[in-house]
Image (spheres, rainbow, N blue to C red):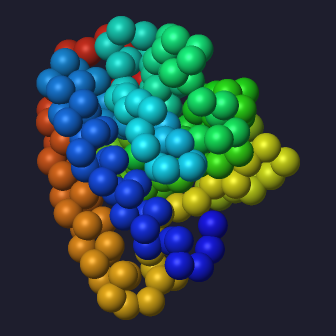
Amino acid sequence: MSGDNDAGLVGRLLDVIEGDILPLTEAGVRRGNKIFGAAILRKSDRSLVLAETNNEIENPLWHGEVHALKRFHELPAAARPDPKDCLFLATHEPCPLCLSAITWGGYDNFYYLFSHADSRDAFAIPHDLRILKEVFGLEPGGYKASNLYWTSYAIPRLVGGMATPDRQRLQARLDALAASYAALSRRYQESKAGNSIPLR
Ligand SMILES: [Zn+2]
């Protein structure tokens, strides 16, 4: 992804987070789930195939990304584009489970808003970095952000590389989303003692 396309694409991804993922996540957090969401869009016209949110209350494997992939494969075959023709969007940098799921699902890209370090530091979810270190022996940033299977894009980095006025306009939207997710995170953290999720 490069050039004039950046601001339009990032603007569309933020539309999907604000308008499609966030309402699902607000409802999910009310049921006791974590704050992570995902969506799948068509590359051709950037239309939404589906959005989903974390559902660990039902199954601890239903992270936002895996839950979206599960729902995607529950769609009728005719409604399902080839994953190679899709954009994969995650609100948070995918954990090791979800990195693998996106790979096995056949996607050649993913975009994310918040980093693993944000999940640990801003959202009190240290598990991504801890699993990378304890299970895979990887330090932060240790997995291959671009590899044989896919290339990943940190949305804040894309925005930071843009010229004004796009950068200022999109940064304001990132700031607003950070505030929305901080509020959701407070709600999750207040409720989590009562849930049965193994890694809260
Ligand atoms: Zn995950």
Quadrant location, the C terminus = top left
For this view, does 129 lie left or right of residue 28?
A: right
Percent x, y for residue 111?
Answer: 53, 53
Residue at 80% x, 52% y is: 147
Please indicate, yes or no, whether residue 143 appears anywhere in the rendered image.
Answer: no
For this view, does 80 lie left or right of residue 200?
A: right
Instruction: Give 164 or 55, whichever is nearer the viewer.
Output: 164
Quadrant location, the N terminus = bottom right
Residue at 19% x, 41% y is: 184
Residue at 53% x, 61% y is: 154
Q: Quadrant of residue 54?
A: top left
Percent x, y for residue 174?
Answer: 30, 65
Q: Quadrant of residue 106?
A: top right
Query: Which residue in the rendered view is the most extreme toward the right?
Result: 148
Instruction: Give 200 or 160, whichever is nearer the viewer.
Output: 160
Please indicate, yes or no, whether residue 27 appears anywhere in the rendered image.
Answer: yes
For this view, does 56 lie left or right of residue 181?
A: right
Vertically, is 92 above or below 5? above
For the image shown, how many numbered marks are present on the structure?
0
Vertically, is 170 above or below 23? below
Percent x, y for residue 71?
Answer: 46, 17
For this view, does 167 lie left or right of residue 194?
A: right
Query: Which residue in the rendered view is the most extreme toward the bottom?
Result: 164
Percent x, y for residue 171?
Answer: 31, 74
Residue at 59% x, 14% y is: 77
